[in-house]
Protein backbone atom coordinates (compact mmCIF):
# COMPACT_ATOMS: atom_id res chain seq x y z
CA UNK A 1 0.00 0.00 0.00
CA UNK A 2 2.85 2.35 0.88
CA UNK A 3 4.48 1.61 -2.47
CA UNK A 4 1.23 2.47 -4.28
CA UNK A 5 0.95 5.78 -2.39
CA UNK A 6 4.55 6.60 -3.28
CA UNK A 7 3.88 5.83 -6.94
CA UNK A 8 0.90 8.19 -7.11
CA UNK A 9 3.00 10.98 -5.59
CA UNK A 10 5.98 10.51 -7.92
CA UNK A 11 7.28 12.61 -10.78
CA UNK A 12 6.79 9.51 -12.95
CA UNK A 13 3.06 9.36 -12.25
CA UNK A 14 2.52 13.11 -12.72
CA UNK A 15 4.29 13.25 -16.07
CA UNK A 16 2.84 10.02 -17.46
CA UNK A 17 -0.68 11.33 -16.73
CA UNK A 18 0.10 14.83 -18.05
CA UNK A 19 1.67 13.52 -21.24
CA UNK A 20 -1.08 10.93 -21.73
CA UNK A 21 -3.80 13.58 -21.54
CA UNK A 22 -2.10 15.88 -24.04
CA UNK A 23 -1.53 12.98 -26.45
CA UNK A 24 -5.23 12.07 -26.20
CA UNK A 25 -6.07 15.72 -26.87
CA UNK A 26 -3.67 15.91 -29.81
CA UNK A 27 -4.99 12.69 -31.37
CA UNK A 28 -8.51 14.07 -31.10
CA UNK A 29 -7.46 17.35 -32.76
CA UNK A 30 -5.54 15.55 -35.50
CA UNK A 31 -7.70 12.51 -36.16
CA UNK A 32 -10.91 13.02 -34.10
CA UNK A 33 -9.75 9.82 -32.39
CA UNK A 34 -11.26 9.24 -28.93
CA UNK A 35 -10.02 5.66 -28.47
CA UNK A 36 -7.84 5.78 -25.34
CA UNK A 37 -6.43 2.33 -26.15
CA UNK A 38 -4.79 3.78 -29.27
CA UNK A 39 -2.97 6.28 -27.08
CA UNK A 40 -1.80 3.56 -24.68
CA UNK A 41 -0.70 1.06 -27.33
CA UNK A 42 0.67 3.34 -30.06
CA UNK A 43 1.92 6.39 -28.18
CA UNK A 44 2.65 5.78 -24.50
CA UNK A 45 5.08 2.91 -24.88
CA UNK A 46 7.65 5.20 -26.51
CA UNK A 47 7.04 7.80 -23.79
CA UNK A 48 7.48 5.12 -21.12
CA UNK A 49 10.87 4.25 -22.59
CA UNK A 50 12.03 7.83 -22.08
CA UNK A 51 10.59 8.11 -18.58
CA UNK A 52 12.02 4.75 -17.53
CA UNK A 53 15.46 5.84 -18.72
CA UNK A 54 15.14 8.98 -16.59
CA UNK A 55 14.31 6.81 -13.57
CA UNK A 56 17.36 4.64 -14.23
CA UNK A 57 19.62 7.69 -14.57
CA UNK A 58 18.17 8.95 -11.27
CA UNK A 59 20.00 12.30 -11.43
CA UNK A 60 18.41 15.66 -12.16
CA UNK A 61 15.15 13.83 -12.70
CA UNK A 62 12.80 16.80 -12.53
CA UNK A 63 14.77 18.72 -15.14
CA UNK A 64 14.89 15.69 -17.44
CA UNK A 65 11.17 15.06 -17.01
CA UNK A 66 10.42 18.69 -17.90
CA UNK A 67 12.73 18.54 -20.94
CA UNK A 68 10.94 15.42 -22.23
CA UNK A 69 7.54 16.99 -21.55
CA UNK A 70 8.52 20.21 -23.34
CA UNK A 71 9.85 18.24 -26.33
CA UNK A 72 6.72 16.09 -26.62
CA UNK A 73 4.46 19.11 -26.10
CA UNK A 74 6.00 21.10 -28.92
CA UNK A 75 5.99 18.08 -31.24
CA UNK A 76 2.27 17.62 -30.58
CA UNK A 77 1.41 21.32 -30.72
CA UNK A 78 3.51 21.81 -33.85
CA UNK A 79 1.87 18.80 -35.49
CA UNK A 80 -1.62 20.15 -34.77
CA UNK A 81 -0.89 23.61 -36.22
CA UNK A 82 1.12 22.15 -39.11
CA UNK A 83 -1.73 19.81 -40.05
CA UNK A 84 -4.18 22.69 -40.12
CA UNK A 85 -2.01 24.70 -42.49
CA UNK A 86 -0.55 21.98 -44.73
CA UNK A 87 -3.16 19.24 -44.33
CA UNK A 88 -0.64 16.57 -43.34
CA UNK A 89 1.45 15.47 -40.36
CA UNK A 90 5.07 16.68 -40.30
CA UNK A 91 7.91 14.18 -40.25
CA UNK A 92 11.39 14.50 -38.78
CA UNK A 93 12.44 15.60 -42.26
CA UNK A 94 10.36 18.75 -41.83
CA UNK A 95 12.69 19.88 -39.05
CA UNK A 96 14.99 20.86 -41.89
CA UNK A 97 12.40 23.47 -42.86
CA UNK A 98 12.51 25.38 -39.58
CA UNK A 99 14.41 28.19 -41.29
CA UNK A 100 11.33 28.71 -43.50
CA UNK A 101 8.95 29.38 -40.60
CA UNK A 102 9.00 33.12 -41.21
CA UNK A 103 7.23 32.70 -44.54
CA UNK A 104 4.10 31.22 -43.00
CA UNK A 105 4.24 32.28 -39.34
CA UNK A 106 1.66 35.05 -39.69
CA UNK A 107 -0.78 32.66 -41.35
CA UNK A 108 -0.08 29.90 -38.84
CA UNK A 109 -0.97 32.21 -35.96
CA UNK A 110 -4.46 32.52 -37.45
CA UNK A 111 -4.90 28.78 -36.95
CA UNK A 112 -4.25 28.69 -33.20
CA UNK A 113 -7.34 28.64 -30.98
CA UNK A 114 -7.80 28.96 -27.22
CA UNK A 115 -8.50 25.23 -26.85
CA UNK A 116 -5.08 24.45 -28.29
CA UNK A 117 -3.45 26.00 -25.23
CA UNK A 118 -4.78 23.11 -23.15
CA UNK A 119 -1.73 21.19 -24.37
CA UNK A 120 0.36 23.50 -22.18
CA UNK A 121 -1.90 23.29 -19.12
CA UNK A 122 0.29 20.83 -17.21
CA UNK A 123 3.16 23.32 -17.12
CA UNK A 124 0.92 25.80 -15.30
CA UNK A 125 -0.27 23.10 -12.89
CA UNK A 126 3.29 21.90 -12.25
CA UNK A 127 4.46 25.44 -11.56
CA UNK A 128 1.68 25.97 -9.02
CA UNK A 129 2.38 22.63 -7.33
CA UNK A 130 6.08 23.34 -7.06
CA UNK A 131 5.41 26.77 -5.57
CA UNK A 132 3.12 25.13 -3.01
CA UNK A 133 5.34 22.11 -2.36
CA UNK A 134 5.48 22.91 1.36
CA UNK A 135 1.74 22.46 1.54
CA UNK A 136 1.01 20.01 -1.29
CA UNK A 137 3.19 16.85 -1.23
CA UNK A 138 2.87 16.22 -4.97
CA UNK A 139 4.73 15.49 -7.15
CA UNK A 140 7.80 14.19 -5.32
CA UNK A 141 11.19 12.76 -6.25
CA UNK A 142 10.40 9.15 -5.41
CA UNK A 143 12.48 6.36 -6.91
CA UNK A 144 11.41 2.82 -7.72
CA UNK A 145 13.46 -0.33 -7.67
CA UNK A 146 15.72 -0.79 -10.69
CA UNK A 147 13.99 -4.10 -11.34
CA UNK A 148 10.55 -2.46 -11.65
CA UNK A 149 11.92 0.30 -13.86
CA UNK A 150 13.81 -2.20 -16.02
CA UNK A 151 10.66 -4.28 -16.52
CA UNK A 152 8.74 -1.15 -17.63
CA UNK A 153 11.58 -0.30 -20.01
CA UNK A 154 11.85 -3.80 -21.52
CA UNK A 155 8.08 -4.24 -21.99
CA UNK A 156 7.81 -0.79 -23.59
CA UNK A 157 10.74 -1.53 -25.89
CA UNK A 158 9.15 -4.82 -26.95
CA UNK A 159 5.78 -3.20 -27.72
CA UNK A 160 7.35 -0.26 -29.58
CA UNK A 161 9.72 -2.54 -31.45
CA UNK A 162 6.85 -4.84 -32.44
CA UNK A 163 4.76 -1.94 -33.70
CA UNK A 164 7.61 -0.57 -35.79
CA UNK A 165 8.76 -4.00 -37.03
CA UNK A 166 5.28 -5.03 -38.18
CA UNK A 167 4.88 -1.83 -40.21
CA UNK A 168 8.46 -1.34 -41.35
CA UNK A 169 7.93 -2.58 -44.91
CA UNK A 170 4.65 -0.77 -45.52
CA UNK A 171 4.80 1.98 -48.12
CA UNK A 172 4.30 5.35 -46.44
CA UNK A 173 1.48 6.54 -48.66
CA UNK A 174 -0.03 9.03 -46.22
CA UNK A 175 1.93 10.25 -43.19
CA UNK A 176 -1.21 11.33 -41.32
CA UNK A 177 -2.89 7.95 -41.79
CA UNK A 178 0.32 6.20 -40.71
CA UNK A 179 0.46 8.39 -37.59
CA UNK A 180 -3.14 7.60 -36.77
CA UNK A 181 -2.76 3.85 -37.20
CA UNK A 182 0.77 3.40 -35.84
CA UNK A 183 1.26 6.35 -33.50
CA UNK A 184 2.50 9.91 -33.95
CA UNK A 185 5.94 9.00 -32.63
CA UNK A 186 6.15 5.45 -33.99
CA UNK A 187 5.33 6.77 -37.46
CA UNK A 188 8.53 8.82 -37.35
CA UNK A 189 10.56 5.66 -36.70
CA UNK A 190 8.79 3.85 -39.54
CA UNK A 191 9.38 6.81 -41.84
CA UNK A 192 13.05 6.80 -40.91
CA UNK A 193 13.35 3.11 -41.66
CA UNK A 194 11.64 3.45 -45.05
CA UNK A 195 13.92 6.37 -45.98
CA UNK A 196 17.05 4.39 -45.11
CA UNK A 197 15.74 1.27 -46.84
CA UNK A 198 14.99 3.22 -50.01
CA UNK A 199 18.51 4.63 -50.05
CA UNK A 200 19.92 1.08 -50.06
CA UNK A 201 17.53 -0.20 -52.70
CA UNK A 202 18.34 1.97 -55.69
CA UNK A 203 18.36 -0.54 -58.49
CA UNK A 204 19.09 -0.34 -62.17
CA UNK A 205 16.12 0.57 -64.27
CA UNK A 206 15.63 1.11 -67.96
CA UNK A 207 12.73 3.52 -68.42
CA UNK A 208 12.19 5.77 -71.42
CA UNK A 209 10.09 8.84 -72.08
CA UNK A 210 7.96 6.64 -74.31
CA UNK A 211 7.19 4.33 -71.36
CA UNK A 212 6.02 7.32 -69.33
CA UNK A 213 3.82 8.62 -72.14
CA UNK A 214 2.30 5.17 -72.67
CA UNK A 215 1.45 4.54 -69.01
CA UNK A 216 -0.62 7.75 -69.13
CA UNK A 217 -2.69 6.35 -72.02
CA UNK A 218 -1.02 7.98 -75.03
CA UNK A 219 0.75 6.71 -78.13
CA UNK A 220 4.20 8.39 -78.29
CA UNK A 221 4.86 10.79 -81.16
CA UNK A 222 8.42 11.97 -82.07
CA UNK A 223 8.92 15.34 -80.38
CA UNK A 224 9.81 17.12 -83.62
CA UNK A 225 6.44 16.06 -85.05
CA UNK A 226 4.36 17.63 -82.28
CA UNK A 227 1.72 20.24 -82.98
CA UNK A 228 3.09 23.80 -83.12
CA UNK A 229 6.69 22.59 -82.83
CA UNK A 230 9.08 25.53 -83.29
CA UNK A 231 6.37 28.18 -83.38
CA UNK A 232 8.51 30.44 -81.13
CA UNK A 233 11.93 29.29 -82.30
CA UNK A 234 14.79 31.63 -81.43
CA UNK A 235 12.78 33.82 -79.07
CA UNK A 236 13.63 34.80 -75.50
CA UNK A 237 11.79 32.86 -72.81
CA UNK A 238 10.24 34.70 -69.88
CA UNK A 239 8.49 32.54 -67.28
CA UNK A 240 6.53 34.37 -64.60
CA UNK A 241 5.49 32.59 -61.43
CA UNK A 242 2.74 34.42 -59.55
CA UNK A 243 2.65 33.74 -55.82
CA UNK A 244 -0.47 31.87 -54.62
CA UNK A 245 -2.34 32.42 -57.90
CA UNK A 246 -5.29 30.07 -58.36
CA UNK A 247 -7.25 29.61 -61.54
CA UNK A 248 -10.68 30.49 -60.15
CA UNK A 249 -9.81 34.20 -59.96
CA UNK A 250 -9.31 34.47 -63.72
CA UNK A 251 -12.52 35.79 -65.25
CA UNK A 252 -13.99 36.40 -61.79
CA UNK A 253 -15.87 39.66 -61.22
CA UNK A 254 -16.72 41.17 -57.85
CA UNK A 255 -19.07 44.10 -57.56
CA UNK A 256 -18.83 44.52 -61.34
CA UNK A 257 -15.02 44.63 -61.30
CA UNK A 258 -12.62 42.15 -62.90
CA UNK A 259 -10.17 40.71 -60.38
CA UNK A 260 -7.57 40.01 -63.10
CA UNK A 261 -8.28 42.32 -66.06
CA UNK A 262 -4.75 42.12 -67.48
CA UNK A 263 -4.54 38.36 -67.18
CA UNK A 264 -8.01 37.99 -68.70
CA UNK A 265 -7.06 40.02 -71.77
CA UNK A 266 -3.73 38.25 -72.23
CA UNK A 267 -5.26 34.78 -71.73
CA UNK A 268 -7.62 35.49 -74.64
CA UNK A 269 -4.55 36.10 -76.83
CA UNK A 270 -2.60 33.03 -75.69
CA UNK A 271 -2.70 29.30 -75.08
CA UNK A 272 -4.57 29.14 -71.77
CA UNK A 273 -4.54 25.73 -70.10
CA UNK A 274 -7.53 25.75 -67.78
CA UNK A 275 -7.21 22.32 -66.19
CA UNK A 276 -3.67 22.37 -64.77
CA UNK A 277 -2.95 21.45 -61.15
CA UNK A 278 -0.18 22.15 -58.66
CA UNK A 279 2.20 19.26 -57.90
CA UNK A 280 4.44 20.69 -55.21
CA UNK A 281 5.75 18.80 -52.21
CA UNK A 282 7.07 20.07 -48.87
CA UNK A 283 9.24 22.62 -50.68
CA UNK A 284 6.20 24.64 -51.80
CA UNK A 285 7.34 27.49 -54.10
CA UNK A 286 10.86 26.06 -54.48
CA UNK A 287 9.36 22.72 -55.49
CA UNK A 288 7.29 24.53 -58.12
CA UNK A 289 10.54 25.95 -59.52
CA UNK A 290 12.14 22.51 -59.48
CA UNK A 291 9.20 20.86 -61.28
CA UNK A 292 8.93 23.61 -63.90
CA UNK A 293 12.63 23.39 -64.71
CA UNK A 294 13.07 19.58 -64.66
CA UNK A 295 9.69 17.90 -65.28
CA UNK A 296 10.58 15.49 -62.43
CA UNK A 297 8.39 14.80 -59.40
CA UNK A 298 9.60 16.45 -56.19
CA UNK A 299 10.74 14.06 -53.47
CA UNK A 300 7.64 15.06 -51.51
CA UNK A 301 8.27 14.87 -47.79
CA UNK A 302 11.25 17.20 -47.77
CA UNK A 303 12.05 20.19 -50.01
CA UNK A 304 13.77 18.90 -53.13
CA UNK A 305 16.13 21.88 -52.90
CA UNK A 306 17.61 20.34 -49.74
CA UNK A 307 18.59 17.07 -51.46
CA UNK A 308 19.60 18.28 -54.92
CA UNK A 309 23.13 19.48 -54.24
CA UNK A 310 24.80 16.21 -55.26
CA UNK A 311 22.53 15.64 -58.27
CA UNK A 312 23.39 16.21 -61.91
CA UNK A 313 19.89 17.03 -63.14
CA UNK A 314 18.92 17.75 -66.71
CA UNK A 315 17.00 21.03 -66.64
CA UNK A 316 15.43 23.77 -68.69
CA UNK A 317 18.35 26.22 -68.11
CA UNK A 318 20.86 23.53 -69.16
CA UNK A 319 18.91 22.50 -72.25
CA UNK A 320 18.57 26.15 -73.30
CA UNK A 321 22.25 26.80 -72.57
CA UNK A 322 23.08 24.01 -75.01
CA UNK A 323 21.05 25.98 -77.55
CA UNK A 324 22.86 29.28 -77.00
CA UNK A 325 20.71 30.83 -74.24
CA UNK A 326 21.75 32.81 -71.17
CA UNK A 327 19.62 32.11 -68.07
CA UNK A 328 18.83 34.04 -64.90
CA UNK A 329 16.30 33.72 -62.10
CA UNK A 330 14.77 36.60 -60.13
CA UNK A 331 13.20 36.42 -56.67
CA UNK A 332 13.12 39.26 -54.12
CA UNK A 333 13.65 37.03 -51.10
CA UNK A 334 16.64 35.72 -49.15
CA UNK A 335 18.53 33.32 -51.38
CA UNK A 336 18.84 30.87 -48.48
CA UNK A 337 15.04 30.45 -48.18
CA UNK A 338 14.24 26.95 -49.38
CA UNK A 339 17.98 26.51 -50.04
CA UNK A 340 17.78 28.35 -53.34
CA UNK A 341 21.51 29.05 -53.10
CA UNK A 342 21.80 25.29 -53.70
CA UNK A 343 18.83 24.86 -56.02
CA UNK A 344 19.72 27.49 -58.63
CA UNK A 345 23.30 26.29 -59.35
CA UNK A 346 22.04 22.69 -59.44
CA UNK A 347 19.44 23.69 -62.04
CA UNK A 348 22.16 25.38 -64.08
CA UNK A 349 21.09 29.04 -63.95
CA UNK A 350 23.89 31.34 -65.06
CA UNK A 351 22.82 34.07 -62.64
CA UNK A 352 20.39 34.65 -59.81
CA UNK A 353 19.12 37.88 -58.28
CA UNK A 354 17.71 37.95 -54.74
CA UNK A 355 17.00 40.49 -52.01
CA UNK A 356 20.63 41.61 -52.10
CA UNK A 357 20.01 42.97 -55.58
CA UNK A 358 16.51 44.34 -54.95
CA UNK A 359 16.96 45.76 -51.44
CA UNK A 360 14.27 46.52 -48.88
CA UNK A 361 12.24 48.98 -50.95
CA UNK A 362 8.44 49.42 -50.98
CA UNK A 363 8.10 46.37 -48.76
CA UNK A 364 4.71 44.62 -48.70
CA UNK A 365 4.60 41.45 -46.64
CA UNK A 366 7.77 39.43 -47.24
CA UNK A 367 9.58 41.69 -49.68
CA UNK A 368 9.55 44.53 -52.19
CA UNK A 369 6.28 45.21 -53.96
CA UNK A 370 5.71 43.51 -57.29
CA UNK A 371 5.82 46.90 -59.02
CA UNK A 372 9.29 47.66 -57.68
CA UNK A 373 10.40 44.05 -58.23
CA UNK A 374 9.36 44.02 -61.87
CA UNK A 375 10.96 47.43 -62.43
CA UNK A 376 14.34 46.26 -61.13
CA UNK A 377 14.01 43.01 -63.07
CA UNK A 378 13.40 44.99 -66.26
CA UNK A 379 16.76 46.72 -65.79
CA UNK A 380 18.46 43.36 -66.14
CA UNK A 381 16.29 42.18 -69.03
CA UNK A 382 17.20 45.33 -70.96
CA UNK A 383 20.87 44.54 -70.31
CA UNK A 384 20.34 40.99 -71.59
CA UNK A 385 18.71 42.34 -74.74
CA UNK A 386 21.76 44.49 -75.53
CA UNK A 387 24.05 41.45 -75.51
CA UNK A 388 22.26 40.12 -78.58
CA UNK A 389 21.93 36.63 -77.11
CA UNK A 390 18.60 34.93 -76.42
CA UNK A 391 17.84 34.63 -72.71
CA UNK A 392 15.67 32.68 -70.29
CA UNK A 393 14.34 34.74 -67.36
CA UNK A 394 12.62 32.93 -64.49
CA UNK A 395 10.68 35.65 -62.63
CA UNK A 396 8.97 34.98 -59.28
CA UNK A 397 6.58 37.50 -57.74
CA UNK A 398 6.05 37.64 -53.97
CA UNK A 399 3.47 40.26 -52.96
CA UNK A 400 0.41 38.00 -53.18
CA UNK A 401 1.66 35.78 -50.33
CA UNK A 402 -0.34 34.93 -47.23
CA UNK A 403 -1.70 36.61 -45.17
CA UNK A 404 -2.57 38.90 -48.14
CA UNK A 405 -2.59 42.14 -46.15
CA UNK A 406 -2.28 44.98 -48.65
CA UNK A 407 -1.65 48.68 -47.91
CA UNK A 408 -4.73 50.79 -48.47
CA UNK A 409 -3.24 52.53 -51.52
CA UNK A 410 -2.67 49.11 -53.16
CA UNK A 411 -6.25 47.93 -52.71
CA UNK A 412 -7.80 48.48 -56.13
CA UNK A 413 -11.06 46.59 -55.65
CA UNK A 414 -14.14 48.25 -54.22
CA UNK A 415 -15.42 45.28 -52.26
CA UNK A 416 -18.87 44.87 -50.71
CA UNK A 417 -19.00 45.25 -46.94
CA UNK A 418 -19.51 41.53 -46.36
CA UNK A 419 -16.26 40.71 -48.26
CA UNK A 420 -14.05 43.66 -47.37
CA UNK A 421 -11.51 42.82 -44.66
CA UNK A 422 -12.17 39.06 -44.70
CA UNK A 423 -9.51 36.51 -45.59
CA UNK A 424 -11.06 36.08 -49.05
CA UNK A 425 -11.39 39.82 -49.48
CA UNK A 426 -7.72 40.26 -48.67
CA UNK A 427 -6.78 37.47 -51.10
CA UNK A 428 -8.75 39.10 -53.91
CA UNK A 429 -7.11 42.47 -53.19
CA UNK A 430 -3.64 40.91 -53.32
CA UNK A 431 -4.40 39.14 -56.61
CA UNK A 432 -5.85 42.32 -58.08
CA UNK A 433 -2.64 44.14 -57.16
CA UNK A 434 -0.50 41.32 -58.60
CA UNK A 435 -2.48 41.63 -61.85
CA UNK A 436 -1.99 45.42 -61.86
CA UNK A 437 1.78 45.06 -61.43
CA UNK A 438 1.86 42.39 -64.13
CA UNK A 439 0.12 44.74 -66.53
CA UNK A 440 2.84 47.33 -65.93
CA UNK A 441 5.51 44.69 -66.60
CA UNK A 442 3.85 43.79 -69.89
CA UNK A 443 3.86 47.45 -70.92
CA UNK A 444 7.55 47.78 -70.04
CA UNK A 445 8.40 44.68 -72.08
CA UNK A 446 6.61 46.19 -75.05
CA UNK A 447 8.24 49.61 -74.67
CA UNK A 448 11.71 48.08 -74.43
CA UNK A 449 11.23 45.96 -77.55
CA UNK A 450 11.46 42.67 -75.67
CA UNK A 451 7.81 41.61 -75.87
CA UNK A 452 7.65 40.93 -79.61
CA UNK A 453 10.75 38.74 -79.58
CA UNK A 454 9.78 36.58 -76.60
CA UNK A 455 7.59 33.70 -75.57
CA UNK A 456 5.96 34.47 -72.22
CA UNK A 457 4.67 31.77 -69.89
CA UNK A 458 2.88 32.34 -66.59
CA UNK A 459 1.67 29.99 -63.85
CA UNK A 460 0.67 29.90 -60.20
CA UNK A 461 3.02 28.13 -57.81
CA UNK A 462 0.37 26.80 -55.40
CA UNK A 463 -2.90 27.62 -53.69
CA UNK A 464 -3.37 30.55 -51.36
CA UNK A 465 -6.93 29.79 -50.24
CA UNK A 466 -6.82 26.56 -48.32
CA UNK A 467 -7.36 24.62 -45.12
CA UNK A 468 -8.44 26.10 -41.86
CA UNK A 469 -7.33 29.57 -42.81
CA UNK A 470 -10.88 29.71 -44.18
CA UNK A 471 -13.51 30.77 -41.70
CA UNK A 472 -17.23 30.13 -42.09
CA UNK A 473 -17.67 33.60 -43.57
CA UNK A 474 -14.99 32.87 -46.18
CA UNK A 475 -16.65 29.60 -47.17
CA UNK A 476 -19.94 31.45 -47.71
CA UNK A 477 -18.26 34.21 -49.71
CA UNK A 478 -16.58 31.66 -51.98
CA UNK A 479 -19.84 29.82 -52.52
CA UNK A 480 -21.54 33.05 -53.56
CA UNK A 481 -18.67 34.07 -55.85
CA UNK A 482 -18.28 30.67 -57.50
CA UNK A 483 -21.91 29.70 -57.62
CA UNK A 484 -21.14 26.47 -55.77
CA UNK A 485 -18.96 24.94 -53.08
CA UNK A 486 -15.23 25.65 -53.04
CA UNK A 487 -13.62 22.23 -53.48
CA UNK A 488 -10.16 20.70 -53.65
CA UNK A 489 -10.35 21.14 -57.41
CA UNK A 490 -10.59 24.91 -56.95
CA UNK A 491 -7.77 24.79 -54.44
CA UNK A 492 -5.29 22.84 -56.57
CA UNK A 493 -6.22 24.28 -59.99
CA UNK A 494 -3.63 26.86 -61.08
CA UNK A 495 -3.48 28.86 -64.32
CA UNK A 496 -0.90 28.06 -66.97
CA UNK A 497 -0.76 30.51 -69.86
CA UNK A 498 1.70 30.68 -72.75
CA UNK A 499 1.69 33.61 -75.15
CA UNK A 500 3.70 34.22 -78.32
CA UNK A 501 3.17 37.87 -79.27
CA UNK A 502 2.25 38.28 -82.92
CA UNK A 503 1.26 34.62 -83.19
CA UNK A 504 -1.15 33.43 -80.51
CA UNK A 505 -3.45 36.41 -80.90
CA UNK A 506 -4.79 34.53 -83.93
CA UNK A 507 -4.41 30.87 -82.93
CA UNK A 508 -4.57 31.04 -79.15
CA UNK A 509 -7.27 29.03 -77.42
CA UNK A 510 -8.46 27.65 -74.11
CA UNK A 511 -7.20 24.09 -73.74
CA UNK A 512 -8.98 21.86 -71.26
CA UNK A 513 -6.82 18.73 -71.11
CA UNK A 514 -5.67 17.67 -67.64
CA UNK A 515 -2.16 18.87 -66.86
CA UNK A 516 0.28 19.59 -64.08
CA UNK A 517 3.42 21.59 -63.42
CA UNK A 518 5.39 18.64 -64.82
CA UNK A 519 3.93 19.38 -68.24
CA UNK A 520 5.09 22.98 -68.43
CA UNK A 521 8.69 22.42 -69.54
CA UNK A 522 7.85 19.99 -72.41
CA UNK A 523 5.03 22.26 -73.59
CA UNK A 524 7.26 25.34 -73.62
CA UNK A 525 10.19 23.58 -75.30
CA UNK A 526 7.88 22.27 -78.01
CA UNK A 527 6.86 25.80 -78.92
CA UNK A 528 10.53 26.87 -78.88
CA UNK A 529 11.46 24.05 -81.26
CA UNK A 530 13.92 22.52 -78.78
CA UNK A 531 13.84 18.84 -77.89
CA UNK A 532 14.05 18.03 -74.16
CA UNK A 533 17.07 16.12 -72.90
CA UNK A 534 17.20 13.23 -70.45
CA UNK A 535 14.15 11.66 -68.83
CA UNK A 536 11.10 13.80 -68.09
CA UNK A 537 7.77 12.87 -66.56
CA UNK A 538 5.46 15.49 -68.04
CA UNK A 539 4.46 15.86 -71.66
CA UNK A 540 3.47 18.43 -74.26
CA UNK A 541 -0.10 19.52 -73.45
CA UNK A 542 -0.56 20.73 -77.02
CA UNK A 543 0.02 17.20 -78.35
CA UNK A 544 -1.37 14.58 -75.98
CA UNK A 545 -4.99 14.10 -74.99
CA UNK A 546 -4.65 11.81 -71.96
CA UNK A 547 -2.83 12.38 -68.70
CA UNK A 548 -2.16 10.84 -65.31
CA UNK A 549 -0.53 13.04 -62.68
CA UNK A 550 -0.05 12.95 -58.93
CA UNK A 551 0.64 15.32 -56.08
CA UNK A 552 2.82 14.48 -53.14
CA UNK A 553 2.67 15.74 -49.57
CA UNK A 554 -0.64 17.58 -49.88
CA UNK A 555 -2.37 14.42 -51.09
CA UNK A 556 -1.69 10.85 -50.05
CA UNK A 557 0.50 8.80 -52.36
CA UNK A 558 -1.56 7.06 -54.99
CA UNK A 559 -3.93 10.00 -55.34
CA UNK A 560 -4.24 10.89 -59.00
CA UNK A 561 -5.73 13.24 -61.56
CA UNK A 562 -6.64 11.63 -64.86
CA UNK A 563 -8.89 12.78 -67.70
CA UNK A 564 -12.03 12.36 -65.60
CA UNK A 565 -11.47 12.52 -61.86
CA UNK A 566 -9.34 13.45 -58.90
CA UNK A 567 -9.09 10.32 -56.77
CA UNK A 568 -7.83 10.50 -53.15
CA UNK A 569 -7.28 7.27 -51.17
CA UNK A 570 -8.24 6.97 -47.52
CA UNK A 571 -6.50 9.40 -45.15
CA UNK A 572 -6.47 9.91 -41.38
CA UNK A 573 -9.54 12.16 -41.54
CA UNK A 574 -11.44 10.98 -44.60
CA UNK A 575 -12.38 7.87 -46.50
CA UNK A 576 -11.85 7.58 -50.26
CA UNK A 577 -12.82 10.79 -52.07
CA UNK A 578 -13.43 11.43 -55.75
CA UNK A 579 -14.05 14.68 -57.64
CA UNK A 580 -15.38 15.10 -61.16
CA UNK A 581 -12.92 17.12 -63.25
CA UNK A 582 -15.77 18.18 -65.50
CA UNK A 583 -17.43 19.91 -62.55
CA UNK A 584 -17.12 19.94 -58.77
CA UNK A 585 -19.40 17.05 -57.83
CA UNK A 586 -18.00 14.55 -55.35
CA UNK A 587 -18.54 10.80 -55.09
CA UNK A 588 -18.19 9.96 -58.77
CA UNK A 589 -18.95 6.27 -58.96
CA UNK A 590 -16.35 4.13 -60.71
CA UNK A 591 -15.49 0.46 -60.25
CA UNK A 592 -12.84 -0.62 -57.76
CA UNK A 593 -10.88 -2.02 -60.69
CA UNK A 594 -10.89 1.40 -62.36
CA UNK A 595 -9.47 3.09 -59.27
CA UNK A 596 -6.90 0.37 -58.66
CA UNK A 597 -5.64 0.50 -62.24
CA UNK A 598 -4.80 4.20 -62.08
CA UNK A 599 -3.70 4.01 -58.44
CA UNK A 600 -1.12 1.34 -59.29
CA UNK A 601 0.02 3.26 -62.36
CA UNK A 602 0.48 6.38 -60.25
CA UNK A 603 2.63 4.55 -57.71
CA UNK A 604 4.65 3.11 -60.59
CA UNK A 605 5.30 6.60 -61.98
CA UNK A 606 6.41 7.81 -58.53
CA UNK A 607 8.80 4.88 -58.26
CA UNK A 608 10.27 5.62 -61.67
CA UNK A 609 10.70 9.29 -60.81
CA UNK A 610 12.36 8.53 -57.46
CA UNK A 611 14.71 5.98 -58.97
CA UNK A 612 15.63 8.38 -61.75
CA UNK A 613 16.27 11.25 -59.35
CA UNK A 614 18.45 9.05 -57.12
CA UNK A 615 20.36 7.81 -60.16
CA UNK A 616 21.42 11.38 -60.99
CA UNK A 617 23.96 11.46 -58.13
CA UNK A 618 27.23 13.00 -59.28
CA UNK A 619 30.13 10.61 -59.55
Image (tube, rainbow, N blue to C red):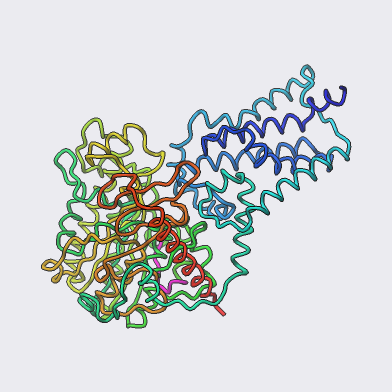
Q: Per the image, is 350 magenta?
A: yes
Decide which of 558, 118 is in the foreground and name it: 558
Residue 230 in percent (x, y) is at 22, 79
Q: Quarter of the image holding residue 486?
A: top left
Q: Residue at x 20, y 76 (%)?
A: 231
Residue range (magenta): 346-354
Decide which of 342, 555 is in the foreground and name it: 555
Q: Residue at x 33, y 59 (%)?
A: 562
Decide which of 315, 205 is in the foreground and name it: 205
Q: Is residue 272 left or right of residue 604?
A: left
Is residue 355 shown to the viewer in this render?
no
Residue 54 in percent (x, y) is at 79, 41
Residue 241 in percent (x, y) is at 32, 60
Residue 408 in percent (x, y) is at 27, 39
Residue most toward the top? 135
How many discs appear? 0
Screen quadrant of the C terminus: bottom right
Screen quadrant of the N terminus: top right
Q: Quarter of the image holding residue 594?
A: bottom left
Is residue 13 shown to the viewer in this render?
yes
Q: Is residue 24 above or below residue 319?
A: above
Q: Per the image, is 25 magenta?
A: no
Q: Residue at x 73, y 29 (%)?
A: 14
Q: Is residue 188 above or below residue 543?
A: above
Q: Is residue 486 left or right of residue 265?
A: right
Q: Residue at x 33, y 66 (%)?
A: 519
Amino acid sequence: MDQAKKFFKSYFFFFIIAISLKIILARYMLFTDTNVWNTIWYELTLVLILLALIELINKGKLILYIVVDVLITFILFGSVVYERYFGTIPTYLDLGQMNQVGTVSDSALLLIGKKDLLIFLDFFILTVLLLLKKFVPFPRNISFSRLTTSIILIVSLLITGTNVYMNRTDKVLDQALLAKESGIFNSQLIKGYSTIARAYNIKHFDITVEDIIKIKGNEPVPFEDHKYYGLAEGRNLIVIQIESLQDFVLGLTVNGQEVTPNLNKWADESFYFTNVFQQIGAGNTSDAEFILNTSIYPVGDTPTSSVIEDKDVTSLPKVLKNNGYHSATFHADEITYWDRHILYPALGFDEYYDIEYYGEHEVIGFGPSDEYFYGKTMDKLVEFKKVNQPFYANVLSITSHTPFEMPEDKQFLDLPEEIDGTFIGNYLQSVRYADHALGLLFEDLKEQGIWDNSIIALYGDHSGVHGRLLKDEDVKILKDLLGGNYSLLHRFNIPFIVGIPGVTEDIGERIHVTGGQLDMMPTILNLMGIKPEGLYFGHNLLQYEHNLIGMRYYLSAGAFFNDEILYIPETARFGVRTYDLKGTDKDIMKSDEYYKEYYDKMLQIYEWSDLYFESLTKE
